[in-house]
Image (cartoon, coloured by chain):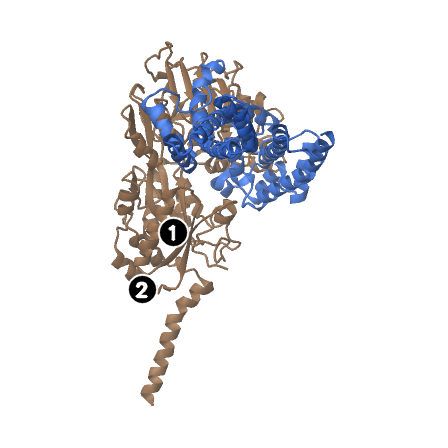
Chain colours: A brown, B blue
Amino acid sequence: MKKIASAALLAVFCLVLGAAPLAAQAGKTSPMADPRVRQAIAYAIDMKAIVDNLMSGKAIVANSMTPNGAWKVAGLNGYGYDPAKAKQLLKDARWDPNYVLDVVYYYGDQMTVDLMTAVQAYLADVGVKMTFRKLEGDLGSQLWVPPADPVNGPSAVKWDMAYAAVAALSMNEYYDRFIPGGASNSHTPADAKLTELIKATHAIDLGAQKKAFFELQKYENAVLPEIPLYYQQVFVVQSKRLDRAGAPYGNEQFNYDWNIVKWDLPKDASGKKVLKTNGGPVSFFEAPFLNPGLFMSTKVLFDHLVVADASLTPYKGQLASSYKVSPDGKTISFTLRDGIAWHDGSPITPEDVKWTYEFSAKVPTLNAVFGSMLKALEGYQDYKEGRASEIRGIAIKGRTVTFTYATPDSNALLCFSQFPPLPKKHFAGVDPLQFQQAAFWQKPVGSGPFMLKEVSMGNYATFVPFKQYFGGTAKIDEIQMYPSGESDPNFSKNAAAGQLDYGYTKSVEDVLALEKLANLKVTPVDIRYTRLFFVNKFPKP
Amino acid sequence: MIAYTLRRFLALAPMMLLMTFLVFLGLELTPGDAVSFIAGPEAMANMDGSQLAALRESLGLDDPFLARYFRWLGGVLRGDFGYSLTSGVPIARIVAERLPATLELSAAALLVSTLLGSALGLASALNRGKALDQALTVAGMIGVSVPEFFFGLVSILVFSIELKWLPVGGRTRPEYLGLWDRLPHLVLPALVLGVSMTAGVMRYARASMLDALGKDFMRTARSKGLPEARVDLVHGFRAALAPIAVLIGFRLPMLIGGSVVIEQIFQWPGVGSEFLAAVRGQNYPLVMTIALLSVLAVLAASFLVDLATAALDPRVKLS
């Protein structure tokens, strides 16, 4: 009798122990909240096989949000393919084999579907069921809504894992989205240690910043708040007749010192040096406040206060002849060059600079890093909420514009190397809410080495050297831009027909097609572009 | 005739209203709106609710469905088609810029398909059962079966990339000044689109001609001692033209709507490619205007077909 009672007690005890995690999965906590589950998923997926086969080796297996290079600590766990370890971790975490992971994505390409299918198979091998679906429509409201309670949830989104990409301008962009209560943190509950480590990466001193990132990466690697998958490279494509005059290959998706003024190529039959490229406008020129360097037109049309090197580190003045950063990082002053002009011949003034950054503060579709930089300015809130007519933290004295920050922003200088001043007089009466729809973006007036000559939307746009450019007149006589973009079959088709001297792409299909063309040279460049699974660790409602 | 025309035009109004309402409803039921396209998921992640609401308000997207529909309809009745939600350009200007390209391509393709299709159909019918007829029948089957995108890509590969005879795409180049300069750009897309449409016309023309050849009036014409060629071409082919005219008439709306596939493949900046971009971007003022023009074109084509049928076939009376 005593034995039966003990056995019964043991059975009840086991039942309670076994049921507890299941009960937790049913509502109180998310099954994804257990780091062992995330580690198991990382071990279960053979990313090397996926990269080698699905991506034809045109990507790099990731072990952190941070891409390989100077900003990454050595010795991180690569979570190499190990299904036995994955199974053990899932067993330890008491994974419910009946739970079906809901994985979402928003890319429309075949490779994404193939990747999801491969991941589904790998997870099935270790006993994890998974479905995947493509999100349509209002993506922001399906992906990035933070829960009302950033500590306990419940989740405001439906998915367990979201396949996404982070194309970071600054290193902080990778991790700031894990701060509790952040606008895009729909996935990670407050974690005091993680938050503390992220905040430390905002140090103004470069050495301290790097050290903080190293510590953060170690913690990230241990707990996997997200599951990094692979790093994409950008592939710079150029015709063999183009001479880049020794210009470095940098992150073509942003602005850096590529010295296009010195680029050269042979004359064509008409005696002109014509550079043909892609990315021509289909119905408007892209404004540079969201993607400041993604489009060729913005790269050649607009100069910036400072210029960055190929690693996106600002290193010298561009429109500014000099600049000065205070030791505490709270003040940055730019002195504009004398005699600089817009493409319509009118002078570039400090008022243009001040107006641009004040106006941009009211544009809703801003790059996240740029938006954070503006928010840190003194008097930003008063201006934004209509209590002040200008931002107190932007002051003009002679040809010097000074930006004063309430809290120093480690990316401020980087922003001034990416987001260009615009000519104030061309935006009179423009509603910041309809910035991109302004007539200016049909025929933009810039400050860069090339000015717009002619545009036929959907056909072509031509650019000629700006004679008053402070950096000298470009050697190329004309740039012809035709409308085709990344993952667009017209890109490789135009290249095959000799209609491409320069372009860039991240698409594996594009690269495989372009590499076969004898007249082209394809150069891979490591960039800040990480593909990953965001993992929703909040319980579902 | 006048009363008939008047009745047809009066019937147009309710049909057009219904069609525009259905298109607007279709757009409304599609997930997301123009803001999600303009901003994209990453930018939207950094926008708070009030920013999104302000953006929607500035574009007039915050009003209820019916209010937006009737505002658009009211604008159209006043001759105001609105402006593009993505570029801010007036719709009338976009259509005025894109329509000539589509008209140029579609008219050329219609011309190619009509002339080629009719001639081959006629030749096929007159050689019924012979080698030529069988060869053309097989060619017609292939023409109907092969998708135009495949035909387009193969043509580009052969004539643009390998032989370098014709441009790879686009309607014009910076250095071009007039139609003569631009003509090489038109040849390939017009031929691909035209030849794709030829098979249908050819099969129709063959069947129609065979039907005409068996009629009594053909025997009468021969009995009058007329040469065989005149009997076939003047008497037979004229009678066979009515059904062909119907088919061609119903293809006229393509002049407005364009061919989305061909315009995409040949980077032809016409209405079709603009329509595709507008649908993807939920740019409803542009989608609605192009849809309205297409509906108008279909109804007008239907009316023209009636007129042509009556003109070509004395048995048909408009009433």
The three-letter amino acid code for the residue at tag 2 is: Lys
Question: Spatial distance from mark 1 to mark 2, Cα to Cα?
Answer: 20 Å
- Name the quadrant containing residue A259: top left
Q: Is residue A299 left or right of residue A519?
A: right
The residue marked by circle 2 belongs to what chain? A
- Which residue matches tag 1? A225
The residue located at (35%, 47%) in the rendering is: A115
The three-letter amino acid code for the residue at tag 1 is: Pro
Q: Position of residue B101 (x, y in %)?
A: 52, 24
Q: Residues within 10 Å of mark 1 (few under 14, many from 20)?
A: many
**Depth order, front residue of B141/A81:** B141
**Depth order, front residue of A215/A107:** A107
Sequence-first disc among 1 and 2: 2
Q: Position of residue A323 (x, y in %)?
A: 43, 24
The residue located at (51%, 45%) in the rendering is: A137
Which secondary structure lies at badge 2?
helix
**Depth order, front residue of A514/A435:** A514
Q: Which mark is residue A91?
A: 2
Quadrant including the C terminus of chain B: top right
* Residue B276 visible, this angle: yes
Q: Is residue A6 above or below residue B208?
A: below
The residue marked by circle 1 belongs to what chain? A
Q: Position of residue A132 (x, y in %)?
A: 41, 52
